[in-house]
Amino acid sequence: MNRRHFLHTSAATLSGVAAAQTPSIPVIDTHIHLFDISRPQGVPWPPKNETVLYKTALPDRYRKLAAKHGIVGAIEVEASPWLEDNQWVLDVAATDKILVGTVGDVEPGTPDFRKNIERFHKNPLFRGIRYGNLWDRDGGRHDDLAAALKRREFVDDLKFLASVGLGLDSANPDTSLIRALLRSKDAVPNLRIVIDHLPKLEVPTEAAAKKAYIGDLHELAKRPEVFVKISAVLRRVNGKVPEDLGFYKGNLDEIWSIFGDDRVIFGSDWPNSELWGNYDSVFKIVHDYVASKPRAVQEKYFWRNSKPAYHWVKRDASQPA
């Protein structure tokens, strides 16, 4: 064996040993939805005519798709405005330790809000509520956060939510919702906020509107305990979903630069994500994006930041401390 071949072989061997000794990064998926279409009462979402999504989504199905990517825990995010579905999710979680938390649906500003929060919060897996561009309520009214903030009882309920250590997730972001989240944070400074799916927001093209939107993001980034999900990244363009990271990189770079390494978290949006691609495709894009960053930063994105964002509950030895 000549010297060059020996050195090449030795280097490859050492590289392989180093790779084998480097532990993989555990992943907490902070955004999955659960529902069972076989229930007698049915489900409010997804609709039956949405054939891609209208399939029972429970932890056993999720695990088969996600475990190979290092996912060791997941946080369920509401998929129903029905009050008792909060309990249904908690009952499902009781039987499967991959679920480390749930973000429920309890409407602030309603007479029984505090009673219902106290009821569900008795279970430590209940980690907060979701509100935003979401459900039609009261004869077609959207969950309009900007309008709701004008009601004292709504703000008082957000203060109660924060006082018991629970957080607020947003839903389906647009520029109006981002501004309303900023107002929410200023009205309730100790409210923990997670902005869901920010990469899917349609950034205004008009200069003044874009400047205002970016300004609101910078202001939110100045506030403590505001987190952003780098989730719902994939897009459909002219009937196709680009798989090239370069197509998404500019948008991700801008969000990351505003909020920084300590505020970004991973979420898959499964199974809603299947409208754009399978779990492998969803995970690959964000994995490839953070692969060039230091391992410590990757760990923050894939699990460490999710802990202060949700205060989730470790339930299995595979889940990081």
Image: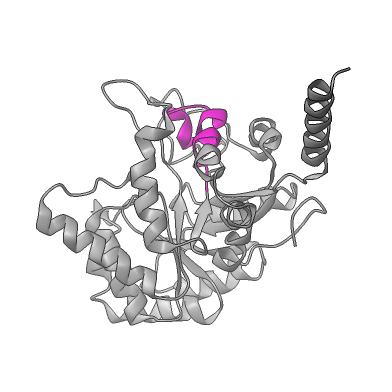
User: Foreground residue, 134 or 293?
Assistant: 293
270 inside magenta stretch: yes
Q: Quadrant of the N terminus?
A: top right
User: Foreground residue, 44 or 50?
Assistant: 50
In the picture, measured across the screen, residue 283 lies left or right of residue 313, that is left
Q: Residue at x 57, y 62 (%)?
A: 305
**Quarter-wise, where is residue 110 in the image?**
bottom left
Q: Compared with residue 99, is residue 3 higher up or lower down, i.e. above or below?
A: above
**Relative image position of residue 318 (x, y in whole percent):** 79, 50
Q: Compared with residue 185, is residue 22 higher up or lower down, i.e. above or below?
A: above
Q: Residue at x 66, y 40 (%)?
A: 59
**Relative image position of residue 69 (x, y in whole percent):** 66, 36
Image: magenta residue range: 267-285
In the picture, measured across the screen, residue 140 lies left or right of residue 50, that is left
Q: Residue at x 14, y 57 (%)?
A: 209
**Relative image position of residue 55 (x, y in whole percent):** 53, 28
Scheme of colours in the image: one colour
Whether residue 5 is visible: yes
Q: Residue at x 58, y 60 (%)?
A: 306
